[in-house]
């Protein structure tokens, strides 16, 4: 006899009348012995009957609603262009800035900026902001005393 988990596969073949005569008799013998297997066969037959009796046409209004939405979306070209504008314009603008920055460095002059230059520039900026902050609070700088 076949393995127990193979009987479920054979049960499906039996239901579709695809088994050879010897296998068909084996399944029928197991059905006679096993109540759970008979119940499973009845359940599968119920499913098969429900599928065969299903309506041939889709739910009324379902396709017409989908078709109307497709037509609405395809006619609204402006929405597509608006989407492209919102996504692509900033991308092109960033690409243009990068390109101009790159091309701007090829002006023939060799400019070298070091890390020390950067820190000196930042130091001056921070000190000027501190002076502004001190003036706002009314604190005199130590240099003025």
Image (cartoon, rainbow, N blue to C red):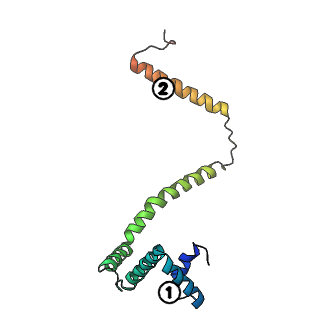
- Residue 11 against residue 115 in the figure, above or below: below
Residue drawn at the location 43% of the way across and 14% of the way down: 139
* CA distance separating discs 1 and 2: 86 Å
Compared across the picture, whether 72 is left or right of 92 comes to left
Task: Using the image, determine if residue 130 lies above or below residue 75.
Answer: above
Q: Foreground: 85 or 24?
A: 24
Q: Residues within 10 Å of mark 2 (few under 14, many from 20)?
A: few
Q: Quadrant of residue 69?
A: bottom left
Q: Secondary structure at mark 2?
A: helix
Whether residue 122 is visible: yes
The residue that label 2 is drawn on is: 129
The answer to whether residue 20 is seen in the rendering is no
Relative to the observer, which residue lies in front, 144 or 89? 89
Q: Which mark is residue 16?
A: 1
Tag in front: 1 or 2: 1
Q: Is residue 92 left or right of residue 66?
A: right
Question: In this view of the protein, which residue sits in the foreground, 17 or 98?
Answer: 17
Residue 79, position in %: x, y? Answer: 38, 67
- Give the x, y percent position of residue 86: 43, 59
- Percent position (x, y) of residue 47? 41, 79
Where is residue 88 drawn, in percent x and y?
49, 61
Q: Residue at x 42, y 77 (%)?
A: 43
Residue 81 lies in what quarter of the image? bottom left
Q: Nearer the viewer, residue 97 or 55?
A: 55
- Answer left or right for 141 relative to 54: right
């Amino acid at each position: 006899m076949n393995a127990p988990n193979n009987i479920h596969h054979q049960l499906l073949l039996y239901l579709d009348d695809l088994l050879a005569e010897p296998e068909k008799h084996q399944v029928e013998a197991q059905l006679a012995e096993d109540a759970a297997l008979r119940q499973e066969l009845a359940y599968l037959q119920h499913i098969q009957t429900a599928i065969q009796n299903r309506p041939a046409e889709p739910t009324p209004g379902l396709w017409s609603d989908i078709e109307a939405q497709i037509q609405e979306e395809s006619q609204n070209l402006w929405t597509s262009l608006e989407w492209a504008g919102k996504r692509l314009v900033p991308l092109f603008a960033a690409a243009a800035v990068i390109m101009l920055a790159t091309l701007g460095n090829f002006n023939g002059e060799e400019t070298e900026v070091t890390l020390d230059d950067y820190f000196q520039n930042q130091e001056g900026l921070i000190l000027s902001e501190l002076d502004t902050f001190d003036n706002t609070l009314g604190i005199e700088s130590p240099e003025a005393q």
